[in-house]
Amino acid sequence: MTKIFRRTLLAALSVAAITASVPAAAQDFKPRIIRFGYGLVEDSNAGRAARFFGQEVEKASGGKMKVRAIGNAALGSDVQMQQALIGGAQEMMSGSTATLVGITKEMALWDTPFLFNNAKEADVVLDGPVGQKVMDKLQEKGLVGLVYWENGFRNLTNSKRPIAKVEDMDGVKLRVMQNNVFLESFKSLGANAVPLPFSELFSALETKTVDGQENPYNTILSSKFYEVQKYLTVTNHVYSPWILLVSKKWWDGLSKVEQKVLLDAAKKSRDFERQDTRAEAGRALAELKQKGMLINELSPAEAGRMREKLMAVHTSIAAGVGQDLWKETQDELAKIRAAK
Ligand code: TK8
C-alpha cells in the first residue's frame, strides 16, 4: 500500500465515521418554524416553560425545528388559537383546558371544584389513563394534546370587598373562563358571573367592567392584577391545568421522528414547568401582600359552606362528561388516597 493510498483510505474512513456519528434520523427532519402561542406575559411560568420547550425541540432536532414562542395572546385568545390550530394556521399553543369544553365536553372534568386535594393527585390523574383518555378525545376535533402543564389552584380576587363568607359574593361581577361549569359554579355562590377571554381581563378589571376574577397566585402576580385588585381570598376552589396542543393538520404531516421530538420535549417541559410553577406559587402570596393586596382566608366553617355549594355542581359535571369517565376518575382518586 502506497503512502498516498493509505492517506486517502484514512480520510475516507474518517468521513464515514463522521457520517455514522450523525443521528441516522437527520434525514427525517425538515426545516420547520413552529408558532407557539400562549396567553400570559413572557415573564411568567407559561413563558418560561414555552422557551424551555423551544430549546429542547431545537436541541433534539439539531436546529431543524425552531419554536417561536409568542406570549401575551398576541396570536389570539385561547379560543382563537384553538381555531387557528384546527384550521392549520398555527402549529402549537398552551392554554387552559377550560376553554376547550366547547370542543370536547370531557374537558369539563378538570373544572370540577375541589376535584384534587393537592398537586400530587393532579399529577397522577392527569398523567395517567384518565388524563390521556380525555386528551385523546381532542384528535377527532383536529387537535393533538401532548401533555398537561400546571396552571394551578385558583383563588379569588376583587376590588369591592374582602370575601369572608359566601354572601359577600352577592352582586360581585366576576369574570370567569368561558364555559358553563365555571358560570354555574360562581352563580351558585351568588356572584354575577361574566365569561370573558383572559386576554381582555386586565382591562376589564381596570375599567371596572368586572369587579373580580379567579386565577392561581402565579398569574395574579405575573399579570399584575394586584394593580387593579385590592382583595385576595384564599379559596383554592379548583385546580386548573394548561394543555400543550398541536394542530392535527400539521402534526399529521410530520415524520415519526419529528413527532417524537415534540412529545419528548413536551414531557421535559411539563416537569420543568410544574417545578417552576410550584416554586413561584410558594413565594407569590408574600409578594402579592407586599404589593399591597389584602389577603384573607376563610374560616373553616365558611370554607365548608362554600365547598358545599360548589360540590353541588358535581352532579351536572358528571352528567356532562359521562358517568363512566366520572366514575373512573373517582375510582382512581380513591386508589391514590388509599395508597397513603
Ligand atoms: C391564559 C389563560 C389563563 C386561564 C384563564 O391564556 O383564562 O383565566 O387561567 O391561564 O388560559
Image (cartoon, rainbow, N blue to C red):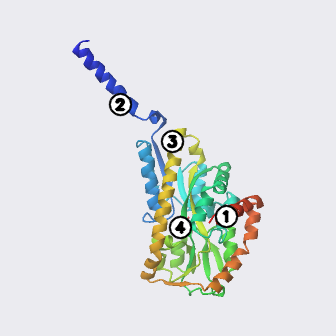
Left or right: 300 in relation to 274: right
Pointers 3 and 4 in contact (C-beta within 8 Å): no
Element assignment for label 1: helix
Q: Which residue is mark 4?
A: 199
- The residue nearer to you, when weighing 14 against 165, is 14
* 10 Å crowding of disc 3: few (<14), some (14-19), many (20+): many
Disc sitting over residue 258 in the figure: 3
Q: CA distance from mark 4 to mark 1?
A: 34 Å
Q: Earlier in the sequence, mark 1 or mark 3?
A: 3
Disc sitting over residue 333 in the figure: 1
Q: Amino acid at mark 2?
A: Ile
Q: Earlier in the sequence, mark 4 or mark 2?
A: 2
Pointers 1 and 2 in contact (C-beta within 8 Å): no
Pointers 4 and 1 in contact (C-beta within 8 Å): no
- Label 4 beta carbon less than 8 Å to ligand 1: yes
Q: Earlier in the sequence, mark 4 or mark 1?
A: 4
Left or right: 323 in relation to 204: right
Disc sitting over residue 18 in the figure: 2
Disc sitting over residue 62 in the figure: none
Residue 70 visible in this rendered orientation of the protein: no
* 10 Å crowding of disc 2: few (<14), some (14-19), many (20+): few
Point out the frontmost of discs 3 and 2. Answer: 2
Q: CA distance from mark 3 to mark 2?
A: 22 Å
Q: CA distance from mark 1 to mark 3?
A: 35 Å
Q: Amino acid at mark 4?
A: Ser
